[in-house]
Image (cartoon, helix red, strand yellow):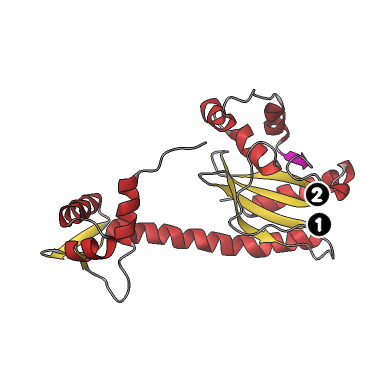
Amino acid sequence: MSTPLNGSVLKAFSILRLFSHERPEISAVTVSTELGMTHATAHRLLLTLEEAGAVVSYRRGYFSLGSVMQELGAVAEASNLMVARIRPVIAELALELNESVMVCRMGRKGPTCIAVAASNRPISVNVSVGTVLPMTNTAQGKLWLAFMEPAEREQWLEGRPRSDALDQVRAAGYARNRGENEPDIGALSVPVLNGRGEIVLTLSTFGMLSRFDDQMVERALPKLRATAEKIRI
């Protein structure tokens, strides 16, 4: 899906990035000089950010970060703590399965890896944190599609025919990739649900397709599900 970006929002975040420990206050002059915009535009954006609570003015013409940014910072810190909590859990699972393991959250462009534990095998498959996976031909993407509301799913499918296989994935509670994305790579993925039964993360093991047969799935699936319960948020 290709959605146009909002230029005003990007400008607002450029302003917020001007704050630092060394510069806790900025003015419209600072913004217009460093970001190359008119003084009027800089002033208007600062007043808009103030109205939203992102900045606050304690003295005329100067702005500091507001309470909303402090609250969002606390949320971001909690998210980082979540990833730190996940890493040792999936490292243990990777050791137990002798295959690589990763956790993805849904990003704007698709399932995005937030934590990975590599296999100790001499020949293995690895993925970097930040990697975005395709939606329709990966185990992780199939899970997200299967748990989506129909309207959202149709947006991601972009006119491609809906497959009954997604209903089967949701009913089974797991998805497989049998070389659909990369010919020699297999994967098995389960959802991590919140208290309302909504998918918030995916937990997957992946490796050489030749090792991801039905017997491996039968052995790995209970371990994946048990680990998904451990990292449930």
Q: Residue at x 41, y 39 (%)?
A: 4
Q: Nearer the viewer, residue 137 or 89?
A: 137
Other-residue count near label 2 (Cα within 10 Å), few / some / many at <14 / 14–19 / ≥20: some
Q: Residue at x 18, y 51 (%)?
A: 44
Residue under label 1 = 97
Chain part drawn in magenta: 174-178
Question: Vertically, is 80 above or below 167?
Answer: below
Which of the two discs, 2 and 1, labels the residue nearer the N terminus? 1
Q: Find residue 230 and report its image quarter.
A: bottom right
Left or right of residue 72: residue 57: left
Other-residue count near label 1 (Cα within 10 Å), few / some / many at <14 / 14–19 / ≥20: some
Left or right of residue 35: residue 202: right
SS state under label 1: helix
SS state under label 2: helix
The kind of residue on which mark 1 rests is: Leu
Q: Find residue 109 and report its image quarter.
A: top right
Q: Find residue 162 and report its image quarter.
A: top right
Of helix, strand and loop, which mostly describes the magenta segment? strand
Image spot of residue 30 (x, y percent): 22, 66
As drawn, the label of residue 220 is: 2
Image spot of residue 195 (x, y percent): 55, 43
Question: Vertically, is 199 above or below 71?
Answer: above
As drawn, the label of residue 145 is: none
Q: CA distance from mark 2 to mark 1?
A: 7 Å
Image spot of residue 233 (x, y percent): 56, 51
The kind of residue on which mark 2 rests is: Ala
